[in-house]
Image (cartoon, coloured by chain):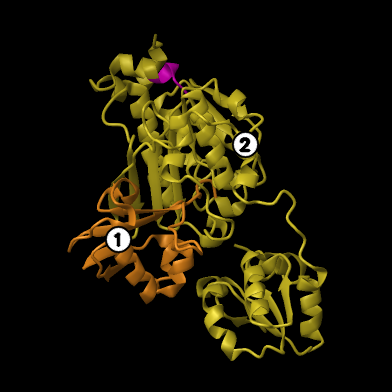
């Protein structure tokens, strides 16, 4: 039953025959779990709260960073340093105090996933990494709960519903994750701030449609959105008869291992790394070495180390021939990941004296020169 | 000629093109022509054994080639071949 307060609040829903009182009561009774309150989770959480979804669970353990605010509109400048889950709850309560918000301040793991997911009707996956995406998929398949899925990269998004009754799952589409390092993350690849707004609201729309039982749900269809072209394309998704969702062989596993992520990242040999402070010492002492910045030109424009030479990682293999293999090199990028790959490229080409600046230009900004902006 | 749509994460290996027109009577031929033109794409699309990587799907128009004739799926003039890799981003 809707209260008088709810009738006033949801009147624009109630006067639509596709929702009406019955639909609004379904929304009120629904329990939806949002995994991640970042770029995708932010618009989903805000709109589902506004729409009157009665119980919304949030899973996140991160804190709000200034670099989140370009797209994670549920958090504000005042929230920097706060737990995302608390900041999200505050915004949602302000939008709609009539709903119940359940906070799960944990990292989702094989040990806790089934316990957390089992109390919800619908799961919305807004995470940022392959191990968690496979975990959510497998848990949804085991529990028979629909997983409203979206992911984003730069200007492009994907959305669909996995693990709905009779429909395909994430593994039907992608049986295995990419090996680490082959697909760039958003932290390295970037993302248009508006993109998760558009793609997250595709997710929110599908959640509401599933609750209402209205329209054609995005099951068995993969929606691709290209913001630059402003085009939506739709591809068919089929249930793979050999997939573990069809054979019933699904169980929760060690997803970090499955995705090829070592438990403890192997420390590189000491000689392979150099700290930003030591690089500064080399520069000040006018030591004979070449500092190569392997970031992209647009990142170089944001901030650079004055003596550095820009060779984007993608161009490095072609430029190797122009470099002296007997020279002394230090490579850096934003955080140290790409430059480590750059060091490997040079070493494979027979360069002996190659070091990676630990922590990239972010660490340089922290430890040497705060006037270099962090991004 | 068919049009191959290059997804954002792979454009860096295809001289930033978002689509490339290629010839080829089958998907296998079209992809071979594509990777001849852009050799850097090869390791992102295929394993060392020349198999399409399992986190990359290929569609002719809106149909997954795994449910057609895979590499041997015929490609007609004006068809669109989509390369759809898995992307993880969301929270980031």
Q: Which residue is mark 2?
A: A253
Taking A243 as reference, is A8 left or right?
left
Name the secondary structure under disc 2: loop
> Where does the C terminus of chain A fall, quadrant-wise?
bottom right
Q: Which residues are magenta?
A: A27-31
Label 1, residues with CA under 10 Å away: few <14, some 14-19, many ≥20: many
The chain in yellow: A
- Along the line of sight, which residue is nearer the eye, A375 or A341? A341
Chain shown orange: that is: B
In front: label 2 or label 1: 1
Which of the numbered marks, if any, corresponds to residue B27?
1
Question: Left of A286 or right of it: where is A226?
Answer: left
Task: Tell me where residue B44 appears, x and y as whole percent.
Answer: 47, 63
Percent position (x, y) of residue B10?
Answer: 43, 64
**Vertical position of residue A200 compared to residue A277: above or below:** above
Please state if A344 lies on the left or on the right of B61 as rendered: right
């Amino acid at each position: 039953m809707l209260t008088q307060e709810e009738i006033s609040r949801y009147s624009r829903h109630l006067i639509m025959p596709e929702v009406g009182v019955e639909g609004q009561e379904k929304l009120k009774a629904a329990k939806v779990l949002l995994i991640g309150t970042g770029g995708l989770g932010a618009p989903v959480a805000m709109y589902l709260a506004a729409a009157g979804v009665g119980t919304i669970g949030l899973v996140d353990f991160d804190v709000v960073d200034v670099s989140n605010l370009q797209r994670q509109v549920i958090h504000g400048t005042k929230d920097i340093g706060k737990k995302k889950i608390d900041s999200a709850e505050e915004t949602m309560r302000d939008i709609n105090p009539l709903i119940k918000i359940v906070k799960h301040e944990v990292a989702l793991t094989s040990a806790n996933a089934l316990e957390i997911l089992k109390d919800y009707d619908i799961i919305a996956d807004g995470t940022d990494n392959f191990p968690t995406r496979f975990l959510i998929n497998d848990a949804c398949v085991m529990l028979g709960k629909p997983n409203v899925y979206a992911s984003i990269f730069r200007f492009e998004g994907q959305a669909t519903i996995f693990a709905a009754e009779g429909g395909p799952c994430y593994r039907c589409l992608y049986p295995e994750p990419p090996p680490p390092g082959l697909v760039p993350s958003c932290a390295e690849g970037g993302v248009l701030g508006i993109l998760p707004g558009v793609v997250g609201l595709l997710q929110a729309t599908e959640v509401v449609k599933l609750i209402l039982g209205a329209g054609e749900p995005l099951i068995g269809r993969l929606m691709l959105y290209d913001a630059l072209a402003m085009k939506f394309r739709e591809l068919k998704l089929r249930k793979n008869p050999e997939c573990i969702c069809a054979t019933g062989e699904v169980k929760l596993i060690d997803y970090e291992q499955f995705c090829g992520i070592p438990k403890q990242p192997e420390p590189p040999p000491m000689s392979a790394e150099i700290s930003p402070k030591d690089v500064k010492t080399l520069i000040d002492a006018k030591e004979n070495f070449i500092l190569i910045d392997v970031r992209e030109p647009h990142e170089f424009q944001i901030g650079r180390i004055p003596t550095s030479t820009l060779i984007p990682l993608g161009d490095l293999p072609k430029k190797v021939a122009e470099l002296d293999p007997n020279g002394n090199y230090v490579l850096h990028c934003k955080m140290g990941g790409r430059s480590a790959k750059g060091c490997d490229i040079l070493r494979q080409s027979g360069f002996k004296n190659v070091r990676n600046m630990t922590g990239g230009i972010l660490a340089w900004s922290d430890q040497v020169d705060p006037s270099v902006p962090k991004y | 000629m068919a049009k191959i749509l290059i997804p954002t994460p792979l454009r860096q290996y295809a001289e930033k093109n978002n689509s490339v027109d290629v010839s080829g009577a089958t998907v296998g031929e079209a992809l071979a022509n594509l990777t001849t033109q852009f050799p850097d794409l090869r390791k992102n699309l295929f394993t060392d054994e020349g198999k399409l990587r399992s986190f990359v799907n290929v569609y002719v128009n809106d149909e997954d080639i795994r449910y057609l004739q895979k590499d041997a799926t015929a490609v007609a003039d004006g068809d669109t071949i989509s390369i759809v890799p898995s992307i993880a981003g969301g929270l980031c």
